[in-house]
Amino acid sequence: MKKILIAFLLVTAAFSINIYLSGCEPHLKPAIGKEDEIFVLADSTQWEHYYEILSPIFEKEIITPQPEMMFNLKRIDFSELNKFKNRKNLLIVATLSNGDKVSEYVKSILDSASYQLVISGNEFAVKKKDVWSKDQVLVIMASNTIEELRIRAFKNSDNLLYYFQKASDDRVMNNLYNPKYERKELEAKYLNDYGWMLYIQADFVEAINNPKEKFVWLRRSPDTDMERWMFVHWIDSVNADLLNNEFIVQTRNSVTQKFYKTMDDKAFVEIAQENISHSEFNLNGKYAIFSQGLWRMNDFSMGGPFVNYTFYDEANKRIYMLDGSVFSPRYEKKSLIQQVDVNLRTFRTKAELPKEKKNELFELLEK
């Protein structure tokens, strides 16, 4: 799901938390709750100010036919903290000069060096994983005053969002990936025939495999009201100069007009031009353009969200387009498009795959 491009790299927090929040215990139970919920421990008297700061960072609208937010912020009181220590996403926010219970709690879990960094204005946020539950993310934001918090949050907004989005994507991928139900025979075929691999779940089927057009279409739950589509398209013997937003729109429309169409050829899929955004993205170490928006049938009979990664493979002088779409008129689209999104990012060229994985897949072809 995304998505809005976030920073390429995590910013490492410069201050530490004392042993009370050490976490990482082997007996921790998995965190529970919805992926898009962030529970915020904050003083009620300051919540209005905090919400004005936090909402633009985390409650960004993502592109789906109906408005959906990337995350939903839910304040919890200090007295409720123990009830929410098992949730996936937790945020503690405090102004240390306020003197409320949350501020005093934050002071108690900061060691002296960390506290001095906050007081001096050199640091204001720290991220911790697996503190009270497995696969949990906890972020603590602290400053001397509301205004100082506002300024620092604005300057670090991309990284704050990235903390939660990356953790959510990792959890989703961990839930999707199951080697027992992996379509390894398809993965091996594409690796052998085309030089690339994409993780394929058992319930995806090959809808089109067209070597001449350099196009592969995979579908999940076809002809239902919860469809997911992924396609891989590539163009050989080209240079990186082609890679721009206009090229992506033209190429995707050309491909979907040819392959995403009704049985009678009267209607086909196209991008809803008024609802598309492009941004730069670090795709497994490669420069890519990430596009997100809405697709629709040209007769306006149906539509949904899509995500797209397009990048240049220097080694093979090839442009790859990785695209995922959702058609789910009766269900929330956000979680489905996130699943497709993280699945697309499993894409690897033959040169990028570990030797063990290549050997495993090629052995299947020999049987």
Image: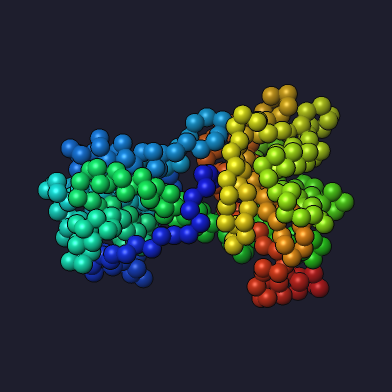
Can you say which quadrant of the picture contains the N terminus? top right
Where is residue 52 drawn, in percent x and y? 31, 36
Residue nearer the viewer, 227 or 138: 138
- Against 329, is 359 above or below? below
Taking the view exactly as shown, the residue that stands out farthest to the left is: 99
Q: Residue at x 21, y 67 (%)?
A: 113
Residue nearer the viewer, 338 or 60: 60
The answer to whether 128 appears left or right of 19 in the picture is right
Can you say which quadrant of the picture contains the C terminus? bottom right
Q: Residue at x 17, y 55 (%)?
A: 105
Q: Is residue 260 visible?
A: no
Residue nearer the viewer, 86 or 238: 238
Q: Residue at x 36, y 70 (%)?
A: 26
The answer to whether 5 appears left or right of 358 in the picture is left
Where is residue 124 drawn, in percent x and y? 28, 55
Q: Residue at x 61, y 36 (%)?
A: 276
Q: Is residue 237 visible?
A: yes
Q: Quadrant of residue 46?
A: top left
The answer to whether 308 appears left or right of 174 in the picture is right
- Against 201, is 349 above or below? below
